[in-house]
Every structure is written in structure tokens, then in C-alpha cells.
Amino acid sequence: MSSRLRGVLLLIVVTAVWGSTFAVVKTLGELLPPAQLIAWRFLIGFLALLPALLIRGWGLRRGRADCPAPAAPPRFSWKDGLWRDGLLLGAWLIAGYGTQTIALQTTTANRAAFFTALSVVLVPLWLVFAQRRRMPWPLLAALPLAVIGLALLSWEGGAWVSGDAWALGCAVTYAGFIITLERLSNRHAALPFTLAQLAAVTLLGWGWAVLSGDVGWPPDSAWGPLLYLGVVATALTTLLQTVGQRTVSAAEASLIYALEPVSATLFSFLLIGERVGLRGALGGLLVVGSTVLSQRSGGEARPETPAPLAE
């Protein structure tokens, strides 16, 4: 198997796992408040990924061939900006995960997934306005497709609910994360930078839990979903994505990530019995089409797009 094909397959697995998280978070939201859910999820993810850094550091010290020295040795130093940048990205991340978790309390997993996918459209739109450039025609065509798609999804699922607004807020905040990550990603080694972000979200999540009075020990029935979200959907997918995108371009990866709402729809049906009718299916196709079309904007109006929310 070629390295490129292996990379594509890894990213497909990652996208499928992300799609499954919408149904899992929605179910888990019945057991835990949003702040506590995020705090425990990211604490588990951080602890699950921490051994990878320790093993890598041990391999570097031992001079192992499969652990070549990076251009910049992994460091956890405030002076090199790692923690500052990790905290900045962590703030964007908790805004995205927080709004998405709140959204899933009142809207369906299907609708939340398609609304969240709009972040891929919002990134080039955001940069067009920030850079004061003319809007590329693919992006111009993608916007009405996205609006019509969301209208069809909302029409089928009943009246507009507060969760839909929170899901749109998730798309906006995650677009901010994507743009910020593109600017900061080359400053630090991938593994310590990822851990710094997870640590920041963990600290912010527990701070949110303390302020909202939601600190507590999860019930026994919540631990299975929490371990899945923390270990598989946070720590493992981060590593698989890092390996996969070594051989797959960002543009190709973005097209794979556009399948996340489709995966979410499938898992929402299998895990919690949510169904999508004809109108909803058409709306979902339009949203996915708009995200794919927006990635053809090209030029400087589109950064190297990292992964959408895993939600």
C-alpha cells in the first residue's frame, strides 16, 4: 500500500470517528452538564496523549532511529510562546466545543453536524473580508447553497431552536480556530503543541465547571462514552490526523473532512435512531456541496485547513 493511500485511509477513519461523536455527545449530555463533559473529556485526552511525548523524549535521548531529532526539540517553555499559543488556541477550541455541546442539548445530532460543517465555508469568507480581497466565484456560489441547505434542514426538523443558533456559533468559533491554527502551527513541534492545546482546554473547562457549579464525579454509565471521546475521538484522532496529512495535501484532506456530516448522519441513525427525510437529505447534500465548492476558492483567501471539530 502506498503512503498516500495509507494517509487517505487514515483520514477517512478520523472523519468517521468525528462523525460518531455527535450522537455520543448528545447522549452523554443527558448525564453531564456541558462544562463537566468538556472538562473530563479533555483531561482524559491529555492524559492519553501525554505518554506519547514521554516515549518520544525517551527515544530522542536514547538516539533511536525511529525517533529522529526534530528541527526544534520539543519544549514546554513559556519563553518560546508554546503555552501562550496553546492557550490562545485552547480558548478558540473551548468556544467551539462548548457551543457545540450546548447545541446538542436541544437540536438533533444531524442538524448540529451540518451546521458545524459551515466552518469550512466561513474560513475563506472570513479571510476575504480580513484581507479585503474580491470574493472568488466558487465561494460566492457556495454561500447560497449553504443557506438553502440549512433552511431545508431546519424546515424538516421542525421550528428553529436555540440549539441551531449555538451550532452556528460553533461554526463561527471553529473557523476562528482554523485561521489561528494556520498562523501558529509552524512555530512549534506538533506533539507538544497539541498537548499544550489539550492542557489549555482542560484548564479552561474545569474553570468553567467551577464557575457554573458543575464540578462532580461522572456516573458509572458516563465513563464508557467519556473514555471513547477522550482517548479515541481526541487523543487517537489527533495522532492519526498528523500522520495522515504528511502524505495528503490540505486541499485533499478538506474534501475528506467534508464527509463528516454524512458520517454523523449514519452514526446518529445507528446509535440513537435519528432519521433524515428527503428534505433533510437534500439540505445536507447542499451543505456538503457548499463546503466542497468553497475549497475551490484558491489563492491566499484559503489557508491550509486543519481538521473540523470532533466533536
Image (cartoon, rainbow, N blue to C red):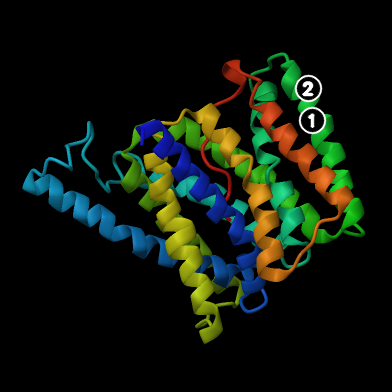
User: Viewer-proximal residue, 78 or 115?
Assistant: 115
- Mark 2 burial class by Cα count in 10 Å: few <14, some 14-19, many 20+: some
Residue 140 numbered tag: 2
Residue 220 lies, in percent from the top left, at 51, 86
Quarter assignment of residue 71: top left
Residue at the limit of the structure toward the bottom, as seen here: 220
299 is higher (above) or lower (below) than 284: above
For the point 88% across and 45% down, which residue is it? Answer: 151
Mark 1 to mark 2: distance in Å? Answer: 6 Å
User: Viewer-proximal residue, 165 or 153?
Assistant: 153
Q: Is residue 249 left or right of residue 63?
A: right
User: Is residue 219 visible from the viewing direction of this image?
Assistant: no
Quadrant for the N terminus, please. top left
Residue 179 lies, in percent from the top left, at 56, 34
User: Viewer-proximal residue, 54 or 231?
Assistant: 231
For the point 49% across and 50% down, which residue is it? Answer: 90
**Which element carries disc 1, helix, strand or loop?**
helix
User: Is residue 13 visible from the viewing direction of this image?
Assistant: yes
Q: According to the image, label 1 marks what residue?
A: 143
295 is higher (above) or lower (below) than 160: above
Residue at the limit of the structure toward the front, as seen here: 1
The amino acid pointed to by label 2 is: Leu
User: Viewer-proximal residue, 113 or 61?
Assistant: 113
Query: Given contact means CB atoms under 8 Å apart, are the residues at marks 1 and 2 in contact?
Result: yes
Q: Is residue 255 left or right of residue 2?
A: right
Quarter assignment of residue 54: bottom left
Residue 103 lies, in percent from the top left, at 72, 60
Residue 39 numbered tag: none
